[in-house]
Amino acid sequence: MKDLFSRQSDQYAKYRPTYPAELYEFILSHVPGREAAWDCATGNGQVAGELARHFQKVAATDISEKQLAEALPNENIDYQVASAETSLQADYSFDLITVGQALHWFDFEAFYAEVRRVTKPGGVLAVWGYELLNIDPEVDALILNFYQNVVGIYWAYERRYVQERYATVPFPFREIPAPEFPMVKYWTLGDLAGYFDTWSSVDKFRQQHGYSPVGELAESLRPFWPAGERKAVTFPIFMRIGIVD
């Protein structure tokens, strides 16, 4: 499992999108028990915090200590530094395992072996990610150019799994068809720029060139985005969910 986000953990906690209630409702409708859940690659604990409202106890793991330092404490969340492939959890512990926007970084075979080890029979694994955001045609065209031609060469190889909506990721569980979930935020141009600065590709560009390319992108967007205006920013969320037999 790769750690590409420790360097910008404070920005990540501030600007990463939050998932819609409909996503959690859909997942929970397929989970029979409410005793324990594991949020793998929890980052700043966003998903774990939501799961804590529904489960007696939540294990939230990440390989980044800096990311976990940004998580809000909760009495029924146990935050631990651990990898997806070696979770340090007990056998047959969990009713639900979740992975938000992180599965593509894992060693699939090793992670799935760990899932089978720690999930209760009939428990559920839900993994999801989100595609490149969309706003309006003029803005989208400039963002797509930035994504492909400015920072495109700095994306890790695994990013392709997100572009393919996890369709090419092996998923050896009894799969449940899942809808797409739109995640909508209302952001200023400054919010959008802050989000782009959390991209691992932007961080790699910054390391190589000594500056962030996001400033130039923001300037190119300014004619289409008046100061202080909040635009609807939509992230299409895709999901794979299945029963672990």
Image (tube, helix red, strand yellow):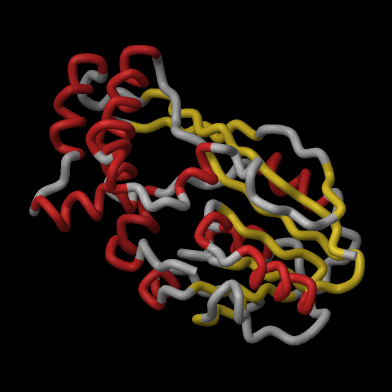
How many callouts does the rendering have? 0
Residue 83 in the image: above or below residue 41: below
Q: Quadrant of residue 78?
A: bottom right
Residue 48 in the image: above or below residue 130: below
| Residue at the image point whose x is 55% and y is 78% from the top | 79
**Camera-side residue of 166 and 125:** 166
Indicate the position of residue 122 as horizontal and vertical percent values.
91, 64
| Residue at the image point whose x is 77% and y is 64% from the top | 96
Q: Quadrant of residue 5?
A: bottom left
| Residue at the image point whose x is 66% and y is 67% from the top | 109
Indicate the position of residue 182 as horizontal and vertical percent values.
60, 31
In the image, taking residue 114 as reference, residue 150 lies left or right, namely left
Indicate the position of residue 226 as horizontal and vertical percent values.
22, 19
Q: Quadrant of residue 7?
A: bottom left
Residue 171 in the image: above or below residue 70: above
| Residue at the image point whose x is 66% and y is 53% from the top | 127
In the image, taking residue 220 as reference, residue 64 lies left or right, namely right
In the image, taking residue 203 as reference, residue 105 lies left or right, namely right
**Camera-side residue of 153 and 30:** 153
Indicate the position of residue 50 as horizontal and vertical percent values.
64, 58
Residue closest to the far left: 210
Quarter of the figure that contains the C terminus:
bottom right
